[in-house]
Image (cartoon, rainbow, N blue to C red):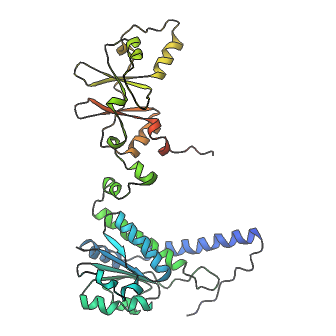
Amino acid sequence: MNLPARSYGALNSSIEQLRTGREIIRVEANALLKMSETLDGAFCDAVELIEKCRGSVIVTGMGKAGLIGRKLAATLSSTGTRSFLLHPAEAVHGDLGCIHEEDVVLALSHSGETEEVCRLLPFLQKMNVPLVAITSGDQSTLGQQADVVISIGRQREADPHGLAPTVSTSVMLAVGDALAIVLSQRRAFSPRQFAQFHPGGSLGQQLRTVRESMRNLDEVRIAPETDTIRQVFSDVRGRGRRTGAVMLIDEAGRLSGLFTDSDLARLISQHETPPLDDSISTVMTRQPITVHPEALLQDVVEILTVKKVSELPVIDADHKPIGLIDITDVIGLMPQDKDD
């Protein structure tokens, strides 16, 4: 059935443009909501088929569906499912050689009749390569030959003439994301594994371990808890990046306390003659918050933010200090306060 074309008018005013923009987003959102309610057992069949795959998931699609496929292949790869994109037009000019019998092909086509995609089907059947299709239904050429069909229904596109892929690609993207994330959960894919594939950018920094980012012992200040305040702050040990904290240790070398420049300033403000010749153990913070070297920086950021502290001693299994994280080391990862 041919649906009537939408008419958004000439959109001469800002109000009309804003109203239309919101309507387009609502159209796509409603399609996604409907998809969330109609997703059926075929989705689970696709998860099982891909999970058992001993090779790669080869994603293919043409045009806008191919662009969605590129994003889906990247998401699968970054969440523990080895995957890459195969351009269907290039496939029939030699790139079919990248497909192995242990692979699974994931094909995206709204109509299920995309010529370039359908030309791959005889080859896939000959190789007995499993095929998962994300398409409008199982009555199309693609749907009839796929082993599993995740049906997204016949989507009405959001542009006035119902032509430009908009709603259909949004639904494909959401279904693909759902596949990738469910598969990653099935594989118990951990943040540490995720970090291996995301070493760059802000996300990569958050997923670095404390050991990779901490200040080592030769860059921090450490003193025996029996030293006086005067001795601790007249000691010039500690090179490199300056930190405002001194880690105090007991006779066994275990962390026993922490004393900061802020603590010293508070003592000076509270006493006309600060007790500089008293043992620092009398004024240090005992049992300070600590972190282990294999923790992730995103955990450190949360601790610093919630506990309102500026320094975190890094300790080993014997509770001996091996380094320190200062708030200035992760300032770029701290959440930004927003005005209400």
Q: In the displayed structure, would residue 196 be above or below residue 157?
A: above
Q: In this view, does 41 lie to the left or right of 328?
A: left
Q: In which quarter of the image is the N terminus?
A: bottom right
Q: Where is residue 143 in the image (x, y as percent from the top left)?
A: 38, 89
Q: Quadrant of residue 10?
A: bottom right
Q: Determine the residue positioned at 70% across, 68% down.
A: 18
Image quadrant of residue 297?
Answer: top left
31 horizontally vs 314: left or right: right
Looking at the image, the residue that sits furthest to the right is: 13
Q: Can residue 278 be seen in this view?
A: yes
**Residue 123 sits in quarter:** bottom left
Q: In the image, is residue 129 above or below residue 25?
A: below
| Nearer the observer, 244 or 9 | 244
Residue 174 in the image, given as x and y percentages of width and height: 45, 71
Position in image of residue 110 (x %, y %) = 47, 84
Residue at image coords 45%, 41%: 330
Which residue is found at the position 35% from the left and 89% from the top?
120
Q: Is residue 331 above or below residue 218?
A: below
Q: Which of 188 and 71 is in front in this view?
A: 71
Observer able to see residue 138? no
- In depth, the one of 184 and 279 nearer the eye is 279
Percent coordinates x, y for residue 234 in the rendering = 41, 15
Q: Residue at x 36, y 38 (%)?
A: 214
Q: Is residue 95 above or below residue 21?
A: below
